[in-house]
Image (cartoon, rainbow, N blue to C red):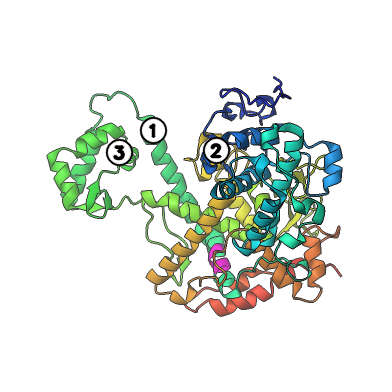
Amino acid sequence: MTLALNPRFAAPATDAFVFDPDRAVEDRRDFVPRYGDDGWSLLALTQNPSQTDDVIRWRWFPEVFREPFRYASWTLINYPLPDRDVALRGAAMRSKLSVGRLTRTVSDWAMFAQWLDERGIKQLSLVTAGDLSDYGHQLAKVRGLARNTAASHLIALSRLHYYGQLYLPDTDRLVAPPWVAEGMDDYLPAASPLGENVTEPIAPATMGPLLVWALRFVEEYADDILAAFEEHRRLVEIAEGLKGPFKKGSGLRLVTYLEQLEAEGKPVPALVRDTKVSTPGVFLAGLTGTPIARVHQVMNYPRWKAYKVQNPGRCLLDTPITAKLGGEPWHSPLDFHDVPGILRHLVTACFIVLGYLTGMRTGEILALENGCCPDPQGPPEAARRHLIYARQFKVARDEDGNHQSAGVVREAPWVAVPQVVTAVRVLEQLGGHGLLFAIEVHDPLQPERRSGRSLAIATMSNRIESFIEWVNTHAQNRGRQAEAIPADPHGRVGTGRFRRTLAWHIARRPDGLVALAVQYGHMRTLISEGYGDPRELHQTGEKAQVASSRQGLDGLQDYYELAA
């Protein structure tokens, strides 16, 4: 199928596809939006597994500008900027935009449209160069946008101008912005000194304990959590397999189980939320082989309903807790309903270990696949190391210089220290559709259009904050407050700051800049065989961890020392 491009500036029919379904990623054609939809998801256009599903919402635009910008956005998605215009406009003007940049550009247009509406300007062709100059100045001076963000807005309006000259009707054509001829510098806040990365590294007082706890989860607690996860999955599968019409005597095993609890004076498994006590249908179904609907029927008999309210208990799994914290089990027996949450924390810990101990970008980590870190080949006596083969996206361009959404395999694989290998192996045990962070495994309630993709970057960022909150509560409950993770003075830890933090520490060591260039792929040089050991950070016993954590952070550059 070919999408017809209309030179007469007529908008497509409301039920027409926004873009040709043949352009969609395989198995995504059913998710191509229609022109008249209230929101357009462009996720079907990209092969980047961690791409956020940022839907273009037409309610962002004032009503008077809604249809003009809907049509302008349609041209942006379907028409390239001609080569001659790309050459004239410079590096900032690609002929086609990535999905993330498309959505960002339309969002920037929405902010501009709202500004115009507030000023009483109701048509794009009525905007003057002076209006654009005012808008450009207020981005930085009034709204206080960062330099790169303000530049993004200016580039978006430049693109609206270029597209207007080529594809839009006269009423929707924007005059040339003054920064096209004058340059953007006068409209942007000052650049950071020497162009240095302005992302703040994570404070050592935060990063040290965070890494300690992440390593605890990955190296010590993982076996307990994975065993509980397998038991949880087994019980759910039993419950799911019992759906259908009741068979005669289907509730007898549950009644026998309840009578035994009653005879021994033991509590009945229940869900307790505030003052409400309810029946854990899936757990009891899996435990006793009773259909879920029949479970609820039996538990509503007056005898068992009263017993449940008077003697509510937890839904404990019989999987053992083997790992220790300070000589005691690190956790009490795991509750069936707590397993999904503790599993999320294990996956988050794996991400933290991967992010900090490799220096990968977030998108690269989330795109890792099962088998990305094969066991090294060769005789045991030979110096062997694990390597991670990953895709990179930031520099992935096609022959025309446009973004390649599938990424490209990194020329120099990442060196994987033993703790990173362990994190990869933990994730591989969880299964998934090729991806270590597959959405089907780690967030199965996501919309179907995200099927086959990974967790989104924003989701992982939120989970890191949840991990920190859980750790601090756990440390408080165990009387180990000194091991809590302090808040970072610059705010949320996020996902991208691990790479920046590792770079900050390595660059301040002898030969650190060289080692940094090697590991980050800026130089084609091999890493040494010597591995540092972050177990220095990972002392056991009753002592507080923070001091040793800081000391260990200063030694992590040993991972990346050059061969002599």
Point out the frontmost of discs 2 and 1. 2
Label 3 crowd bin: few (<14), some (14–19), many (20+), radius 10 Å: many
Do residues under tags 2 and 3 come within 8 Å of each other at their CB atoms?
A: no
Return the disc, 2 or 1, that comes first in the chain's sequence. 2
**Residue indicated by mark 2:** 64
Secondary structure type for disc 2: helix
Name the amino acid, label 3: Thr
Name the amino acid, label 1: Glu
The residue at the point 66 percent across, 52 percent down is: 131
Left/right of residue 419 with respect to residue 239 in the rendered view: right
Return the disc, 1 or 3, that comes first in the chain's sequence. 1
Secondary structure type for disc 1: helix
**Residue indicated by mark 1:** 240
Left/right of residue 496 with respect to residue 492 in the rendered view: right
Q: Say above or below: 436 vs 517.
A: above
The residue at the point 45 percent across, 68 percent down is: 472
Total numbered labels placed on residues in the image? 3
Name the amino acid, label 2: Val
Residue nearest the viewer, comparing 540 with 403: 403
Whole-number angstrom distance, CA of label 2 to CA of label 3: 62 Å
Q: Say above or below: 530 vs 135.
A: below
Secondary structure type for disc 3: helix
What number is the disc on residue 288?
3
Q: Is 537 colored magenta in this rendering?
A: no
The residue at the point 83 percent across, 49 percent down is: 90
- Chain part drawn in magenta: 210-214
Q: Determine if residue 528 is in view.
A: no
Whole-number angstrom distance, CA of label 2 to CA of label 1: 51 Å
Name the spot of residue 433 as percent of width and height, x first: 60, 38
Quadrant position of the N terminus in the picture:
top right
The residue at the point 64 percent across, 32 percent down is: 71
Point out the frontmost of discs 2 and 3. 2
